[in-house]
Image (cartoon, rainbow, N blue to C red):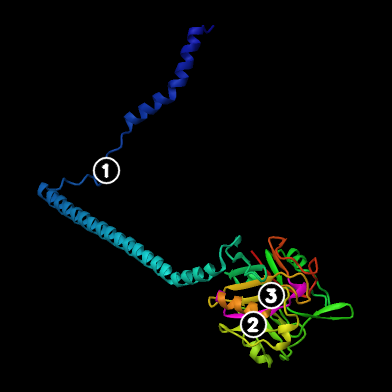
Amino acid sequence: MITPVKQVNRFFMLALAPFIGLIICMLLFRPELETGNVLPAALPEDRVTAQTQAISRELAGAKDAAVQTSSSIKRTTQLYNKTTSTMSTIVQKAAVQASRPETIYNKRITSKLGIPFERVDSDRITIEMYHVNPGTYTGYAMKIKLKDPSAMQMAMSSEPGRSETTMQAVKRSGAIAGINAGGFADSGGKRYPLSTTVMDGKYVNGFQASFKDLFFVGLNDAGKLVGGKFFDKSTLDRLRPQFGATFVPILMKNGQKTIIPDKWKVSPKRAPRTVIGNYKDDQLLIIVVDGYNESGSSGATLEEMQGRLLKLGVIDAYNLDGGGSSSLILNNRVMNRPSDGSLRPVPTHFLFYK
């Protein structure tokens, strides 16, 4: 019978047997070391010293080169930053100098208008509203700087003969301001724009040569006011009008008063007026004069308008449709007092966008 002690001894003998056999094999069969792969003999001390000194010299040279390169890069960076700063200063000073004449001119024309009681300013347009009250009539002057030509457009219904008030046109298109534009002719219960009319760079009803005292006025693709009498289409085409309308008469040309035909001096003598003009820096000036009716007893005469425009320094100016058609909208408010008691629906409107 195998006792527990013998069982334990047998277990350990079986467990250690492989290891004991491996040790015996290693003692009986020891391989001889190959003599072919031997460590190289030590280098002579003087040779090691020479190589070390050479490497040290190369490292020192590389360090000096790196220091010089770093210093050169630093100097170049400092010079670049200094040059950039100097050029930036020069550009800023040049911009200030370039804008100085424009600023001086704007202050000069603004001083003649007074103090604006309302202002709209954005990256596309600047609008300033002034009171006009020389004693014989009352009205409003709206000075406009178009920073983007697309900030001024003309509204006109796509349905022939359809008209709307300036307020309706402003709200429909999302404009910030608007005035009535050209004249019109009524026919068959509908209201059509008078003579040559341009919309989106195209003639609405073809080109009509100027006759009697009619003129065309509008804006070209560069945001400049263009206008006058045009007796052939090619002359007007060269001005590249994007939109425009027609009425009578021209009030100012090249800074000088024009001759007003006798008919328009008395028909009517006084009336509500809407006038558009431009300064030599292409800013626009719109004047809307109030009047109680169209009988000639209230409002302003065309000669009075010319005198006011000349005093304000306007270069070119055109009399738009007046009377009950005169309307001026700003910030969704009717600024003037329409002589009809309410705004009159007309075919065309000049609108301004913020």
Q: Nearer the viewer, residue 308 or 165?
A: 308
Which residue is under mark 3?
300
Q: Give the distance between the C-alpha atoms of the residues marked 1 and 2, in whole angstroms.
A: 119 Å
Q: Residues within 10 Å of mark 2 (few under 14, many from 20)?
A: many
Query: Could you tell which of marks 1 and 2 lies nearer the N-terminus?
Result: 1
Q: Amino acid type of disc 1?
A: Glu
Q: Residue at 69% across / 85% down in the picture? A: 215
| Res. 27 image quadrant | top left
SS at badge 2: strand
Task: Please state the horizontal and vertical placement of residue 176, each as a whole percent of the image.
Answer: 67, 63
The label number, if any, that marks residue 95 in the structure image:
none
Q: Give the distance between the C-alpha atoms of the residues marked 3 and 2, in whole angstroms.
A: 13 Å
Front disc: 1 or 2: 2
Which residue is under mark 1?
34
Q: The magenta stretch spans which residues?
A: 312-326
Q: Nearer the viewer, residue 272 or 176?
A: 272
Task: Please state the horizontal and vertical placement of residue 245, each as a whole percent of the image.
Answer: 71, 80
Which residue is under mark 2?
251
